[in-house]
Each structure stands twice: as C-alpha cells, then as structure tokens.
Image (cartoon, grey):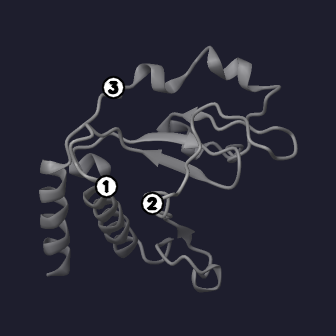
Amino acid sequence: MLGELGLPGLLMTTGSRGLHVIVPLDRRADFDTVRSFAHEAAGLLAARHPDRLTTEPRKANRRGRLYLDVQRNGYAQTAVTPYAVRARPGAPVATPIDARELDDPELRSDRWTLRTVGERLADDPWARTDTRGRSLRAPRERLRRLAEDEAG
C-alpha cells in the first residue's frame, strides 16, 4: 500500500516481538498529521485484509490476525533504532531487512543477535535504499481517495 501512496517503506526486525515499517519523512508534517496518517493507512490496510490484519490493540479481539501497531506514533512512545541491542535473553539486535526477506521461513524478530549481527553489517539492505525524507502532502490525498473509492 505504501507503493500506492508513493512512499518508501523501510523494514526492520525489532529484536523483540515484531517488525517495524519505517517511512522516511521530510519533517514538514506536524505530529498530529503524521499520527493521523499512520492510523488511517493502517485502518485501510486492515479493511482490505480483515481476515489477516487488524488494528485491534486487545489481543483477545485479534483472533489470530496480525496486529498493525501504530501506537509508536504517539506522544512519549519510544521506537527501537536500527542495530540497537535489546535487553533480552540472547542479546537480539534490531536489524534492517529487505522486503524479499519477508518470505524467509527463518525470519524472526529476534533472528540476529550481538554474536551474529556482524555478518549482516556487511550487507545492510538500507544502504541500497533511497532513505531521503518524503512529504506527506500528496500521499495524504492519495490515501483519502483510496479510502473513498473502497468505501463505495
């Protein structure tokens, strides 16, 4: 969906329990605009795939669906940075990944550790990616049109 909106998405394991999708922005949109955009985009994505995705924060209400957590886009919330070592057993490391790796059956959020991340540093997938910040102006309009089209 980010491609439909004209935005790049950078992927990263968290070294904990999930994956992060990071969208580099140009810092022109204010906090409330970015937060609203993230919520609306996740809502549309979940509406497109209601059997597989949800924005429901309560585990009991997810019924086996993947949770699209946009809560990191909130005041006083924290997000892990790339290559941060997590304070968890085995010292897992938050690690950038390539979209093609999503199909790897061995991919886990804690796949790389302090002992194994060195091999990964030699082939950082984000080094091959355009990470310059983008404006949200046109993507917000595209998202609005997509939501209207899908609502009927």
| Mark 2–mark 3 CB contact (< 8 Å) | no
Going by the numbered disc 2, the residue's amino acid type is Tyr
- Residue 130's tag is 3
Depth check: 18 or 3 in front?
18
Quadrant in which residue 147 is drawn:
bottom left
Depth check: 74 or 148 in front?
74
Depth check: 101 or 11 in front?
11
Give the left or right position of residue 98, taking residue 133 as reference. right
Question: Which residue is at 73% across, 44% downward?
Answer: 110
Locate residue 76, reporting x and y percent. 50, 58
> Disc 2 to disc 1, how far (Cα)?
9 Å
Quadrant in which residue 15 is drawn:
top right
Locate residue 26, reporting x and y percent. 25, 37
Q: Earlier in the sequence, mark 3 or mark 1?
A: 1
Going by the numbered disc 3, the residue's amino acid type is Asp
* Vertical comparison of 129 with 29: above or below: above
* Vertical comparison of 89 with 151: above or below: above
- Label 2 crowd bin: few (<14), some (14–19), many (20+), radius 10 Å: few
- Residue 75's tag is 2
Image quadrant occupied by the N terminus: bottom left
Secondary structure under tag 1 reads helix
Secondary structure under tag 2 reads loop
Quadrant in which residue 144 is drawn:
bottom left
| Mark 3–mark 1 CB contact (< 8 Å) | no
Q: Which residue is mark 1?
A: 31
Locate residue 143, reporting x and y percent. 19, 61
- Label 1 crowd bin: few (<14), some (14–19), many (20+), radius 10 Å: few
* Vertical comparison of 9 with 126: above or below: below
> Disc 3 to disc 1, how far (Cα)?
23 Å
Q: Earlier in the sequence, mark 2 or mark 3?
A: 2
Give the left or right position of residue 137, taking residue 114 as reference. left
Going by the numbered disc 1, the residue's amino acid type is Phe
